Amino acid sequence: MKHPNMDREHLTETLRRAGFLNLHVEEACSRSGARVLGRRIGKDRATTVWRSLLAVRESTGFHPLLTPLPPSMLVAGELAEPDVFDDRAVTAPREVVAEVTAAALADALAYAGEPDEAEEWRAEFDPQRLAQKILPEPEPVRIREFLPDWLCLVETRDGWSVPQLLPGYPYAPNWEHGPEGRPMLDSDHVAFLHTWHDRFRAELLFVSERVLMLDVARPPQEPLAVAEAAIEQYAYCPDASDPVTYAKRQSQNRTWQFAWD
């Protein structure tokens, strides 16, 4: 929904105050009718400007987003499943996350070759047991494929809603952790981002074709909460990781990155 007091001049002034000079803004419109504006930006100042625009999101009605893609490409993504969006991603996101997480465990158990392997998966999906492996200090975050060539503004006050407005970004190929083995829906992205925002103040920072990053103001620190988040992170993006790795390297940190191969 468009912000009633927002116009191009207001946005331009907001961007100018954020440090833009010789402003040139590209504009596109998503399928839902939300405007997406963007300007090229250097990597050295991208995160700083993103934070300044996030701070005024309520007054502008636009969520800032770093990306290698211009607005014209962001609005042209392919729908994961046309005409399918689970509204619980907005009204009851933890229900969706719980269903996907349960499906991820069922999938892991189905492919477990030996009883010991199945028991190992059960242990990794058990928050109480996984919490015993939490390190006092997380390992250093390893960020890759962070290429913020564009600073875009998406017309919404809720960063977690951006995957609904820009379907197809990010794209999660070979992901079949949904109930009954279905592929990832745009509403799955929204549900995970929504519940993490509510619990940890996680804000959508960066999106590319197959990478998503969150800036997390209050990441979990208590071992059980860290374990619960790590299990969800694995269910969301199982490529090249597992719940233990997420718990040791990412869940307690302020930057979360997900990459689908």
Image (cartoon, helix red, strand yellow):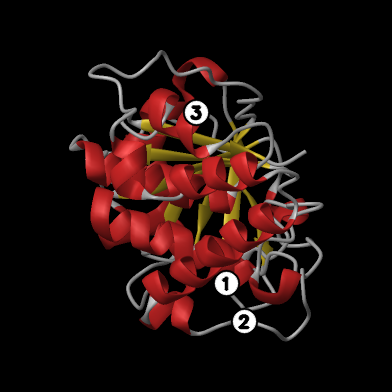
State the SS at label 2: loop
Circle 3 SS class: helix
Tell whether 214 sits left or right of 135: right
Residue 46 placement (x, y as % from top left) = 48, 27
Q: Tell me the quarter of the image containing the N terminus.
A: bottom left
Tell me the distance, in whole angstroms, between the alpha carbons under discs 2 and 3.
Answer: 30 Å
Q: Earlier in the sequence, mark 2 or mark 3?
A: 2
Q: What separation in Å lies between label 2 and label 1 (alpha carbons)?
A: 5 Å
**Which residue is at the front of the view, 74 or 237?**
237
Query: Could you tell me residue 135's position as x and y percent?
Result: 29, 20
Q: Residue at x 52, y 17 (%)?
A: 142
- Type of the residue with mark 1: Ser
Asked if residue 74 lies left or right of residue 131, the reply is right
The C terminus lies in quadrant: top right
Residue bearing mark 3: 245
User: Which numbered disc, 2 or 1, marks the residue that appears first in the sequence?
Assistant: 2
Pointer 1 local density, CA inside 10 Å: few below 14, some 14–19, many at least 20: many
The kind of residue on which mark 2 rests is Phe
